Amino acid sequence: MATEDVLTKPAVPVVGHVITDDDIGVKQGIKIQAINFNKVFKLLTDPHSTTLYDRHFHALQRLIRHYKSGLLLKDLVQAFKIINVCADRAASHSDYLQPMQELLKICSLPFLKEKSSDETVYSQIVVESISQLGYLMRVPNRDIKLELANTILSIYTQKPSSQKFKDQLPCSQAYNIAMLEKSDVAETLVKSLSLLEQDLEVKLCLMNVLQHLSSFSTPNCDKMLSADAASRIASRMNDPDPSGRLLFRSIEILWNLIENGNREEVSRQLNSLVCLNALKDAFSERMTQGYSHYDRQLRNDLLVISTLVASSCPEAPFIETGYAKQLMLFGTFQEVRSHNALVKYLKLGTNPEDFELKKLLISMLVVLSKEPATVPLISESNVILAMLSYIHPNENTSQAQEWSPAQFEEIQLHVMAALCTLGPLCVQDYIDSQGSTRLLLLLEWCVGKDDFAGHGNSFHGLGGRGNKRAQMRYCLHLMRSMVSLRDSSVNQDLTDQGAINQILDILQSATRSDMPDDAIDVEMQCDMLYILSVLCDGEQHRKELFGEKGVDSILRYLKTNPKKLFNGLGHHRMMLATLGAIWCCIVGATINEDQFLEGEGIFLLLDLLQNAARSMHNLILGCLTDLCENAKSVSHLSTWRGSSDQTVGKLLIRIWKEEEKELGVMRKEDGTIADTNKPLIGTLQDSEGVTPLPANSPSQSIVDISENMRAKLYALLYKLGFEELQGLSAEDQVTLCIIERYMDFKQGEVWSEITEELTQEGVRPVTPDQEALAVIGRASQELASLVIDMQEEILESETQHDLLEEQELYSQIRENHKQAENTLEKWQDYVARTSNYELLKSAKKLQDLSIHQSREEVDNSRERGSFHDTDLTNLQTTTFQGRQIRVDSTPQDILNESTMRLQTQEKTRAVTLQQSNFVFAQ
């Protein structure tokens, strides 16, 4: 019974109490109520419900109401499907425009994510959705386009709001920017500009979006350029716009494309008649009619963009559009009076914008000069005359409406830098404007004592603050550019004006100054040496003007510490300029050469050759070779001694070895010729081989002479005399054998090339010529074999000499050892005779026998008085004595050894005595 009661007892009911976070208020914020997008999309697209407009609008309004705070990332696909359906139906039914506009406003809000991983998972969907926004510009409705522009701008610039959501978080601004950059919305917006030519407000709004998209984004700029953004925008920048915002937006976008995009691509797109005409019209209008600060800034920006196009595309149609001539007019109207209507009432002030314009115009003229067709325009516009008007001494004060001293200095330096390019293009204009006279007067002012403190504000004024170095530097730059043309009229004009003496005075002051030189000082001295070299090259009279003053300056430069050549200040350039001045100003003038030799110039050149880098050897050897045409030079070369008493022959042979090692000439380890067929050919020449060439083209053998220093080394050693060189080792003499036969080997090399070229061309010489070629080839090989024999003979002689010296050294060593043995033997015999009486008697007998044998065999020698007795009476010593006694002390080493032995014996005796006493005590 009890069991049945338990089984039939009713169960206790269980009530499920589920309390959510929302019920207890843990979660706060807006809750996004999900809607089934599929039902809404089906309602809009189903054939049976396409005409149920009221239901469509009701569903769309409910959708907008529930997602008014933002769209979820997971719902973007369905949301944009619905937006595209509304866009397609907007043309036939305008009631869809208002819901579509509301949906676009929702899209401008930050997208919402439920998980942190949603940004990665739905990234491609977000990119495609943003791209769809650009495609919606096809909707022919002004409000929709404005809303689209605002939506895209909000996605790119709007930061996430502080509004809180339940279970969702807004995506970050960086995420939105990254997704937009991956989309093609920027390219689409550029292409849609062509649809907005008649609606200025929408176009300006879209230009504002493009300006923001291109401000700091390289990907957006690249995609805009792929749609020809620069060309599209520049060609329409002058469209009617009362507000002026269209030109401003256009210039800003072009600037962004230049800064963040590909400059070459921007220049290429602007390189057209339409774009350049637009730039010209905009610049001309702002130049002549713009008076505000805003207009002047736009004018300068347009000029910078034009300069970029001209520098990247020299062939751009600046001349065809008249832009080049217009720029030259604006660049010179202040200095050269013009009757052109554009500049009749035009004036430039001293404000910063006009000052920048002046410098930009000068830079633009330099850039335009890259195209040869602009040179006649430069000459016609009197550009050189206008620029030369700035080359005069600076003033410390200025009049009203004139450039301030600092501004004038900066423009002056800019002009001189520009003339370095423009002057050589218009030589006649330079001469007609008395350019050389202006330069020399300015140079005289630069080294004068007039009070002037340079401001040194610009790039060109580097190092010129508080002095005149900047003006002097660019004055010498311009003079160097003009003389480098080697135009006889320009150089003669400079010489007639006293340029040589004036520059030499400056160089003498520089060489005698105790102030350390910096990079600018070294640069100016290099320019002056180069100018003197060009002026004196090949002109005997000008070399005489160079004279004693110039030679003295050159000698001072040669005494420069070789360590300065590697300090990075440009002293190596100055040394090269010095060598060039020796070649052009001293060599060939007997008076200058004699003075150079008296000043030990040859010794200084050889010291430089020994210490300088290998790259300078060729030029130094060239100077020495030409100086050797003077017979007095050879004795100087032979007298010179370098470090470690090195002779000139040894130095030249060392350089020859280094040159052959650099060329890869095959030599044996001992320096002898390795291949009789190629005694002089290096690795590069051998690898290029022999190829048939025209008669007026030099072959590899001839080119080899000018490409390395071996010919100059041969010429110098030939002048010195191969047989009169001193201080050479056997290895040097082996190399000297090759150098001595350099010309013969080179001739054989040329004939070998001729034979090989004829073979390759399939040309068979006539029999006598063929035999002659064969004889020449054999003679060349026999000569190489003969040189090898001479080299081996030198090496063998050196080997024998070394062996003889070795034997002599061994003989000296043996003799030294024998003398030591004799000394020891005599000492031992001496000790034995003093301690052993029998040995003493034997020694006495031997002595008497030796004396007896040395006497004449005459019996009556005693009677004749010629007999001398060798014994001394009353002798008390055990040695053989003479009338004078010499006492030899015991050698120190033996004495020390005996003393140590005695001390040891005494110590041993003392120890033994102590032990005996100890035993006795016990």
Image (cartoon, rainbow, N blue to C red):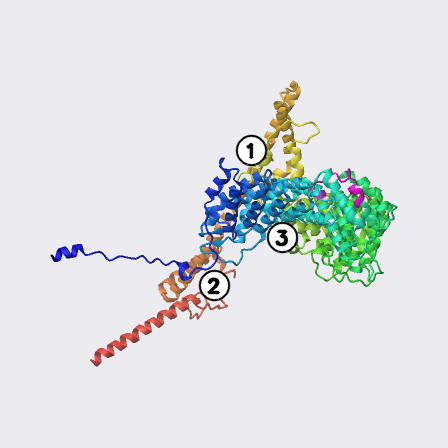
Say what amino acid the circle numbered 1 marks.
Asp
Check residue 313 for magenta coloring.
yes
Of pointers 3 and 1, the one earlier in the residue sequence: 3
Say what amino acid the circle numbered 3 marks.
Asp
User: Which quadrant, please, contains the N terminus?
Assistant: bottom left
Residue at the image point whose x is 73% and y is 62% from the top: 514
Q: Are marks 3 and 1 in contact (CB under 8 Å)?
A: no
Instruction: Judge depth for marks 2 and 1 and give the one in front.
Output: 1
Q: What element carries label 2?
A: loop
Give x and y (percent) for residue 687: 57, 33
Q: Is mark 3 on a helix, strand or loop?
A: helix
Q: Is residue 166 placed above or below 910 in the rendered structure?
A: above
Query: Mark 1 — residue?
Result: 675
CA gap between label 2 and label 3 equals: 63 Å
Query: Mark 2 — residue?
Result: 869
The one of 695 and 809 positioned closer to us in this rendering: 695
Instruction: Judge depth for marks 3 and 1 and give the one in front.
Output: 1
Q: Give the crowd class for mark 1: few <14, some 14-19, many >=20 residues within 10 Å.
A: some
Of pointers 2 and 3, the one earlier in the residue sequence: 3
Could you tell whether 227 is left or right of 361 in the image?
A: left
Of pointers 2 and 1, the one earlier in the residue sequence: 1
The one of 695 and 460 positioned closer to us in this rendering: 460
The reply to whether residue 885 is visible in this rendering is yes
Q: Is residue 754 placed above or below 644 in the rendered structure?
A: above
Query: Mark 3 — residue?
Result: 645
